[in-house]
Image: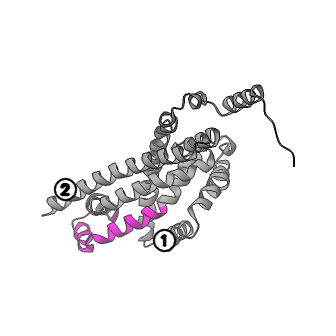
């Protein structure tokens, strides 16, 4: 068995190669761990917010499809929901990011290969959580008494007008706590997009740990950052739920 001997000059050349290839590693020599990993927070927040907004649109459409009287629309919505629920999230992220999203872009005349990894990650998270939110929206709509739809129709409203002006406002108010929980869940699941080389806080933590070999410190800081964000969001959600209960009395 042979041993690899690396001189100081060779080490510096290797470090410069890594720094030049990955970018931003001058902070490693300064030991500024929190600053380096924290630089991915904006990417994490942007990815989560954008993906959740798109997921809400997809979830609303799929939720309406689940209760549609049209058999084709209803079956398409059911297929979408069951497909997402039946495949592991990580496998779905790879499939959506590297197969479905670029192929779908090619079908509509866009260059699928030019789509950035960040955009692919956002699309993957949105499609995955759109299926979960579809069930949330469906439950919210069904929680509103059907008599209100009948009353609106008797006043001359169309089904679409009644849904938009009468049913959905009440349904959304009922499901706001559930939407908040799903947003927190998406924030945590956004760490999975690091496998696509998206430079979120998980990816930055992995890069720091792999380059500096400070695995314990890196993952402790990573855990603290996620825990801080989720705790703040959980406290805000609980406060809002209390407000809803007080307003409902």
The part of the chain drawn in magenta is: 131-160
Q: Position of residue 193 (x, y in %)?
A: 57, 50
Left or right: residue 3 compared with residue 127: right
Q: Position of residue 192 (x, y in %)?
A: 55, 53
Q: Secondary structure at mark 1?
A: helix
> Dot 2 corresponds to which residue?
243
Please rate how many residues cluster around mark 2, counting C-alpha atoms within 10 Å: few if below 14, some from 14 to 19, many from 20.
few
> Dot 1 corresponds to which residue?
74
Left or right: residue 98 compared with residue 121: right
The image quarter containing residue 64 is bottom left
Mark found first going from the N terminus, 2 or 1: 1
Q: CA distance from mark 2 to mark 1?
A: 35 Å
The image quarter containing residue 112 is top right
Give the residue at x 23% y 74%: 147
Q: Which mark is residue 35?
A: none
Q: Secondary structure at mark 2?
A: helix
């Amino acid at each position: 068995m042979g041993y690899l001997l690396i001189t100081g000059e060779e080490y510096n050349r290797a470090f410069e190669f890594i720094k030049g290839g990955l970018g931003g590693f001058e902070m490693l020599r300064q030991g500024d761990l929190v600053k380096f990993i924290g630089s991915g927070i904006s990417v994490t927040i942007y990815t989560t917010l954008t993906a959740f907004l798109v997921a809400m649109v997809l979830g609303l459409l799929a939720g309406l499809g689940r209760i549609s009287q049209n058999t084709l629309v209803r079956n398409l919505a059911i297929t979408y929901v069951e497909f997402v629920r039946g495949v592991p999230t990580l496998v779905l992220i790879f499939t959506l990011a590297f197969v479905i999203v670029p192929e779908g872009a090619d079908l509509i005349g866009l260059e699928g290969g030019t789509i950035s990894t960040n955009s692919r990650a956002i699309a993957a998270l949105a499609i995955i959580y759109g299926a979960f939110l579809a069930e949330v929206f469906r439950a919210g709509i069904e929680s509103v008494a059907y008599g209100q739809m009948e009353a609106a129709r008797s006043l001359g409203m169309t089904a679409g007008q009644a849904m938009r002006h009468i049913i959905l406002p009440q349904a959304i108010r009922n499901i706001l706590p559930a939407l908040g929980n799903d947003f927190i869940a998406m924030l945590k699941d956004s760490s999975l997009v690091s496998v696509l080389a998206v430079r979120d806080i998980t990816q930055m933590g992995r890069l720091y740990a792999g380059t500096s070999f400070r695995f314990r410190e890196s993952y402790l800081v990573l855990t603290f950052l996620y825990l801080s964000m989720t705790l703040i969001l959980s406290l805000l959600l609980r406060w809002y739920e209390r407000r809803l209960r007080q307003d409902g009395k």
